[in-house]
Amino acid sequence: MSDAAKNKVIQLKPIATLGNWCVRLLYTLIFLELVYFVTVLNEYRLEVINAPFPGFESEDAYIQAYDFAANLTVVTALVHFVVIIVAITLNSFWIVRSTHNAEAIDPKPGRIKKWMALLYNFIPFVNWWMPFKSVTQVWHTSLGKDDPLNLPAPAFFWAWWICWIIYYVLSNQSAKLALRDDQQSYLASLQVDLFSTPFGVVSFYVFARIIRRITDAQKEALDSKVLLGALA
């Protein structure tokens, strides 16, 4: 084994456990998105009901049902918020680790570095493109493609990224509407939430598959390098 290859072995870092947790959290978010969709749909249905409250024995029965639905929506939203914060945190670690490993596998100049790959996610407007480019580079490198820095993204990457941008924009719009102190704005925020759910589900699912494939490829690379090192 050459000295350069030995340096790559040293640089590769374990990623399997981190990747597994990221995937689990993304699947958890998909589940919570679907639960939230059902709770919001039920609350919206109750919101638009007017007297004489069809389907309910009395106004009191309607109020109890509405309060329960509204409280359930709030609880689901809070759980979703906590999980997405944890997911963003772990995904940030995964981005740094996977980008580091990609550079260790193929240290070509011009590659997006690990800390920039993370930072790009938090810079307005830049975060609409550069994270996509960074993950594309990591994907091609991890799968051993030739010229990984210049290859176009696989077609299914666009499903992840376009759906993520739409979901992100709609979620922000929903939050702004919900903060307004009037019923019409709140109803509009529920409508936006209902519309955004399919985009979130698709984005989370495809990104989970991307993380899984990159993680498995880098784990295989690390395992093979360690085995070769042990046999050397």
Image (tube, rainbow, N blue to C red):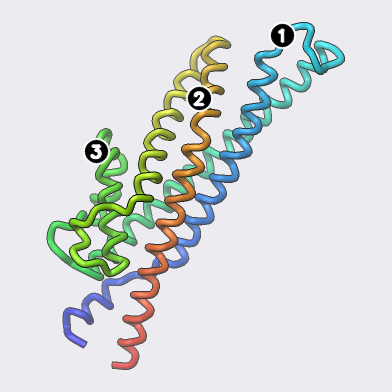
Locate residue 144, reporting x and y percent.
27, 69
Residue depicted at 35% across the width and 81% down the height: 224
Amino acid carrying label 3: it is Val
Per the image, label 2 sits on a secondary structure element best described as helix
Q: Badge 3: how crowded within 10 Å, few (<14), some, or many (20+)?
A: few
Residue depicted at 56% across the width and 39% down the height: 33
Image quadrant occupied by the C terminus:
bottom left
Look at mark 2 in the image and give the residue it sits on: 192
Q: Quadrant of residue 154?
A: bottom left
Per the image, label 3 sits on a secondary structure element best described as helix
Most extreme residue toward the top is 51
Residue depicted at 34% across the width and 82% down the height: 226
Amino acid carrying label 2: it is Val
160 relative to 111, above or below: above
Q: Is residue 189 left or right of residue 3?
A: right
Locate residue 35, reporting x and y percent.
63, 38
| Mark drawn on residue 126 | 3
Between the residue at mark 1 and the residue at mark 2, the CA separation in whole angstroms equals: 22 Å
Q: Quadrant of residue 99?
A: bottom left
Look at mark 1 in the image and give the residue it sits on: 50
Between the residue at mark 1 and the residue at mark 3, the CA separation in whole angstroms equals: 46 Å
